[in-house]
Amino acid sequence: MAEAHQARVQKTIEDMVQNLERDHIRKMQGLMFKCSAECCERSTDSMSQVHSCIERCHTPLAQAQGLVTSELEKFQDRLTRCTMHCNDKARDLFDSGAKEPAVRALMDKCVGSCVDDHINLIPSMTHRLKENLDSIPQ
């Protein structure tokens, strides 16, 4: 993928992840640490009970991180498939005898279209992630 296209996607995804972290994940981290601290204050519990308590405290955050990671992997897979389709189109054009500038132009236009299409998917992906994060029991 051309560097400018890649930078656009990366910036948009980074902004989305930062917003999710600030508005959702950070709150979950705070609750996890408070919960874990409360587990450690249980002076009558055994070591394994305290560890189990701490693990339960970490579960919501682990689920949240798994959700975000899974969604980002799906997004990346879809974008990769789209750009691979562009590679195939460019290769077919080149094999048909087209000159390199025409192939490069086709590739750049195709990848740009992939990037535009996928950047347009980010708001709905963000909405879906926010709903899923909000549904995780604390």
Image (cartoon, grey):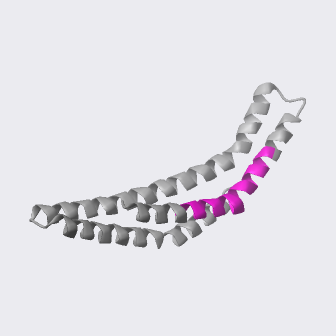
Give how far across and how far down residue 118 sits, in percent: 43, 68
The reply to whether residue 138 is visible in this rendering is: no
Compared across the picture, whether 38 is left or right of 102 comes to right
Q: In the rendered structure, does residue 99 fall within the stretch colored magenta?
A: no
Quadrant housing residue 15: bottom right
Give how far across and how far down residue 55 sits, in percent: 71, 38
Give how far across and how far down residue 133 sits, in percent: 64, 60
Provide the residue span drawn in magenta: 13-33
Total marks drawn?
0
The reply to whether residue 34 is visible in this rendering is: yes
Q: Which residue is at a point 18% across and 60% down the rendered structure image?
A: 91
Compared across the picture, whether 64 is left or right of 72 comes to right
Between 83 and 30, which is closer to the camera in this rendering? 83
Q: Which residue is at a point 41% across and 60% down the rendered structure image?
A: 3
Q: In the rendered structure, does residue 27 fall within the stretch colored magenta?
A: yes
Between 82 and 111, which is closer to the camera in this rendering? 111
Give how far across and how far down residue 4 sits, in percent: 43, 64
Compared across the picture, whether 77 is left or right of 105 comes to right
